[in-house]
Image (tube, rainbow, N blue to C red):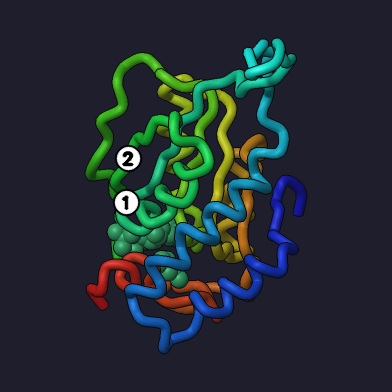
Amino acid sequence: MSNVFPSRHPLVAHKLALLRNVDTEPKKFRELVPEIASLLTYEATLDLELRPIEVQTPLALAKCQALQAKIGLVPILRAGLGMVEGVWALMPSAEVWHIGLYRDEKTLKPVEYYNKLPIEPTVQVCLVLDPMLATGGSAVATVDILKRWGVTKIKFVGIIGAPQGIENMQQHHPDVPIYLAAIDERLNERGYIVPGLGDAGDRQFGTA
Ligand code: PRP
Ligand code: URA
């Protein structure tokens, strides 16, 4: 699979084991999601472009670099919300644009219910945030929305991906790299990732 980057970082593996555990309470779950998102974003942003700047230190002018592009974080509601804090800590000037989608329980197709993007794009790079890439329908639909908005550089940062979701994304958006903590075995008959971690939204918000 090209353009898919499962993390090999030991801290990610350790935290993912805690996240998967059925006995992990929502409070701990809510702490782990942004921590993992932050570590994955560190890996996902390795190729961001820089521009040269000069900075006055107490002693002299220093030749430095600053991020070139304006970055947008795009959490898919609800479960992507928990990832924002961890990513924002790394890039506090990023804009956050929420996209609301839920999966129809029968068809497993995404249904859009929230999108307040302005007409003109305000950022050049988007990081789509959603812990679960299951059938890939939600991720594909979100990238469709962002491309229609006019953004061309898009990355997907998730936590667990299923082979089917990765394939779906690669078929529709082969230009979008996918960063994950792990690639799991399969989807079950209800479209849940196995072994996965269950319902990421319910586990964060205590609504199971
Ligand atoms: C979950 C998850 C993804 C989607 C993944 O959201 O957060 O958005 O399912 O599934 P897919 O790859 O098959 O589209 P859900 O629809 O459960 O909504 P929620 O986050 O509001 O609970
Ligand atoms: N959404 C989730 O929250 N978990 C899954 O395993 C699949 C979709």
- Amino acid type at circle 2 is His
Residue at x 35% of width, y 52% of height = 81
Q: In the rendering, which numbered label is found on residue 98?
A: 2
User: Quadrant location of residue 14?
Assistant: bottom right
Q: Total marks drawn? A: 2
Within-10-Å neighbours for mark 2: few <14, some 14–19, many 20+: many
Mark nearer the N terminus (1 vs 2): 1
Q: In the rendering, which numbered label is found on residue 114?
A: none
Q: In the rendering, which numbered label is found on residue 77?
A: 1
Q: Is residue 142 visible?
A: yes
Which quadrant is the N terminus positioned in?
bottom right
In-front residue for pair 90/131: 90
User: Quadrant location of residue 113?
Assistant: top left
Which quadrant is the C terminus positioned in?
bottom left
Q: Is residue 81 rendered to the left or right of residue 191?
A: left
- Image coordinates for residue 166, horizontal then vertical, percent: 61, 55
- Amino acid type at circle 1 is Leu
- Image coordinates for residue 11, horizontal then vertical, percent: 65, 67
Q: CA distance from mark 1 to mark 2?
A: 7 Å
Residue at x 57% of width, y 63% of height = 161
- Image coordinates for residue 162, horizontal then vertical, percent: 58, 65
Residue at x 50% of width, y 36% of height = 91
When the figure is inspected, residue 151 is found, relative to residue 174, above or below; the finding is above
Q: Does the residue tagged 1 have its C-beta within 8 Å of any atom of ligand 1?
A: yes
When the figure is inspected, residue 129 is found, relative to residue 34, above or below; the finding is above
